[in-house]
Image: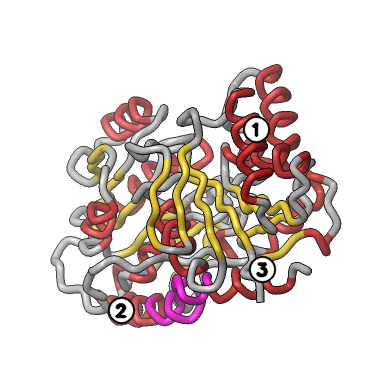
Amino acid sequence: MTRRRIVIVHNWIEVGINIQNRQLAYELSKLYDVWFLSGSRLGAKEIKVNDNLKVVEWPNKRPTKLKDLWFCWKFFKEIQPDIVMAHFTGIRLSMIAAFFAGVRHRVAWYHILSKQLENLVNNKRKERWMIRKFKSGFLFSNHIITFHEFGKKDAMDFLNKRANQISVIPNGMLLKDCTEKIGFELQRPVFLFLGRLHISKGVDTLIKIFKIISEKYPEVQLKIVGEGDMGELLKEMILKSGLEKNVQMTGKTFSYEGVFGYLQNAYALLVPSRIDNYPTVIIEAMSSGVPVIGARSGGVPEMIKDGEDGFLCETENENDWAGKIELLIQNKNLRNEMAANAIKSYKERFTMDKHVENVIRFIESLK
């Protein structure tokens, strides 16, 4: 039987979701012939990983030029893939090239929700242009993959796609070497925010929440890990609220190991997003045995089992958030029970093996 030919379009680097797609490529190469088209620089035009997996470099780091489109079209015509699966900035040109090269199955992963696009720029004219550009890539795809049912509904409405054109595949995470930490014995509970400092992430609401918390529990700390355009505003809010001893901003962590280092010392992870698609940090926390308190926003409610492996709170409802945080502070046994359930949730729903299994099932459904 002829092996199916698959192209994955993303970045061949060990950062964030790229790590998972590298691992996915390895696993798929056991069954199929796989090419990985990478925007990140390889140091060579092509790398042979194994007999069934090759990594090929785009002409440009960000594939947005006609040169990249021409390269992609020629590449597809040469290898004649059955399936092209694309992510992020690679979607637009690869889907157009695949369409005109006659690729039968053109799969685009839906990483950004429609409401998130509105928060990327302040200029309405630029926003309209960005939305048109974003939609144009999906116009040439005939399959879309979302991480959850909320994303599926959003893609149907925003991209005008039919339900049978959209599949739901939760992301998986390749677990790094770290210790599952169910018990917690630190005298000063440290709550953690880990992500981009952007208005959509809602991190500013945590300052208001911890003003409430610190008045009753002065020993409790909040650690904010990340960088972004809200950095200076957050520092001002911390000073005005008198929270210099309770809230620490550490800046960005540049390594995957650094992320898990912070999680290993966290009492709970806080995800107060105003809008979010599928925060990978929730999976990272669960795999480390860290409960998650998240906002009822976007795809977050489909990741957290409220009252089991964490809590869900109303977005920007400071009293709701303070109440749930206080529950965990007062009840260490509850916190540790949620930690055990978080690990269970990771193993049942978010492992890399489960993700690969779901992707293979999707590939085999394409006729």
Label located before the other in sequence (1 or 3): 1
Local secondary structure at mark 1? helix
Residue in front for this viewpoint, 80 or 218: 80
The majority secondary structure of the magenta stretch comes to helix
**Residue 15: % across, % down:** 36, 48
Relative horizontal placement of residue 333, taking residue 160 as reference (left or right): left
Local secondary structure at mark 3? helix
Q: Which mark is residue 336?
A: 2
Relative horizontal placement of residue 333, taking residue 367 as reference (left or right): left
Relative horizontal placement of residue 223, taking residue 302 as reference (left or right): left
Residue in front for this viewpoint, 291 or 176: 176
**Mark 3 touches mark 2? (CB < 8 Å):** no
Q: What amino acid is labelled 1 in the image?
A: Glu
**Mark 1 touches mark 3? (CB < 8 Å):** no
**Mark 1 touches mark 2? (CB < 8 Å):** no
- Label 1 sits on residue: 118
Q: What amino acid is labelled 3 in the image?
A: Ile
Relative horizontal placement of residue 314, taking residue 168 as reference (left or right): left
Q: Quadrant of residue 263?
A: bottom left
Residue in front for this viewpoint, 325 or 88: 88
**Relative to 289, residue 283 above or below:** above
Q: Which mark is residue 363?
A: 3
Q: What amino acid is labelled 2 in the image?
A: Asn
